[in-house]
Image (spheres, rainbow, N blue to C red):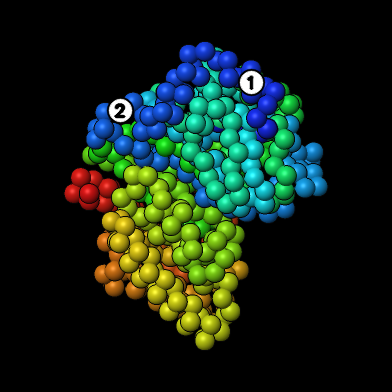
Amino acid sequence: MAATVTLTVTAAAFGGSLADRARTGSQASAQQAAAANPAGAAEPGHEHWVNTWTSMPQLTEPGNMPPAPYTQDGAVLTDTTLRQTVHVTLGGRCLRLHVSNAFGGAVLPVTAVSVARPAGGRSGARAIVPGSSRPVTFGGRPGVTVPVGAQMVADPLDFPFAAGETLTVTMYLATGQQSTNITSHPGSRTTSYMLRGDHLDDADLDGAASVNHWYFLSAVEVQAPPTDRATVVLGDSLADGRGSTDNGNNRWPDRLRARLAERADTAGTAVLNQAAGGNRVLNDGLGPNALSRLDRDVFAQPGATSLIVSEGVNDIGTADATPAAQQAVAADLINAYQQIVLRAHEQGLRVYGATLTPFGGNQYDDAAGLREASRQAVNAWIRTSGQFDAVLDFDRAARDPQAPRQLHPDLDVGDHLHFNPTGYQALADSVPLRLFGPESR
């Protein structure tokens, strides 16, 4: 099971309540000590930092902005407490948060942040366990200003948590972000809450507005044994979990992690979901194209030793249904996969390629079968080229044996492209766990 962590962030200038929070006695002293020793308290060489949870940063579309009054002309989340939960994969005793302003149109001033345990241990919980909240610091200070395009990593925080647990992160932003270009992950499928005023450590945000998006958080790191590592999923809505259950953590990367956790030789592998609905390999869609985000979303992930490439359907489905366009997109996808493998191998990562799943009957399908021919050509290359270190045959796991151009009806959420939770479990079950065992390191 993965752990869910709830994070609360308060955004404001460094003043007022910040001075009050600085008087947190031994906790503040501990945070300052941690800042002086950024690697944490472990003896050198015995532990290292590994990401245990990630969300792919994106520029927030108008329809995914915080609801009024939390979005106003030229400002977002002014004098607002934002509470979010995250479901971690690996556990440990010490964590660090990443706050991202990758797509912000102005600096992101975060006044204060805390980590707590969510009520009932549930993803999407509005309340926290009373007394569980702990302050997060940045360089020994209770808040941070994140420059445009940057991310900031918090000081190590002693906060023991188990693998598969959910954590709550709460932020307070006193002045908000003075732009309507903000960084988020709209496809969180996890409920977040926002409430006017400073309610950083309140047990419950009664009366808060809710949305199913994450804002500003991009990663949680854990201080882990040297044998722990991570695999990164580079994907689109099929990995982001469209059709999965809100607050259910039953996307296929979640279910793969649950399988890994059941075996001693693979339990130390985190699964980092760097997918976004509508994402494409070759061209920007919802979020930057996959080739352009390799450095930030894959290579910069602490502890990563392998990469799963699971996207390309949107490239085929949005290319014109003409012979020339489909021949071009298939050839370009194959070249892009080669580039991904080449660059990942240069970083010492093993690369696993997932075949593209069927979309017969979806709007991507065309009467002449040109897009299906592209899918088949790309899948044939993935299976036979030998470029990938291993192949995950999602197509075989998902197709209807009686109609192989279509998803099996038991796995189809209803649009003939995306999966229901049973379908995502089937994809996860098809992944050979040996790829993440000792022999794969």
Q: Categorize mark 2 by other alpha carbons within 10 Å: few (<14), some (14-19), many (20+).
A: some
Identify the residue position indicated by label 1 in the image.
Answer: 19
Element type at mark 1: helix
Name the residue located 47 percent from the left edge and 18 percent from the top edge: 29
On screen, 278 above or below 369? above
Q: Categorize mark 1 by other alpha carbons within 10 Å: few (<14), some (14-19), many (20+).
A: few
Counting from the top left corner in percent of width and height, residue 234 is at: 44, 56
Determine whether, in the image, residue 43 is placed left or right of residue 283. left
Q: Quadrant of the N terminus?
A: top left
Name the residue located 77 percent from the left edge and 47 percent from the top edge: 74
Counting from the top left corner in percent of width and height, residue 240 is at: 51, 51
Instruction: Let me know if residue 433 appears in the view.
Output: yes
Viewer-proximal residue among 129 and 30: 30
Element type at mark 2: loop
Determine whether, in the image, residue 64 is placed left or right of residue 188. right
Q: Which mark is residue 357?
A: none
Identify the residue position indicated by label 2 in the image.
Answer: 42
Q: Earlier in the sequence, mark 2 or mark 1?
A: 1
Counting from the top left corner in percent of width and height, residue 245 is at: 55, 42
On screen, 50 above or below 327? above
Name the residue located 26 percent from the left edge and 28 percent from the top edge: 43
Viewer-proximal residue among 422 and 214: 214
The total number of labels drawn is 2
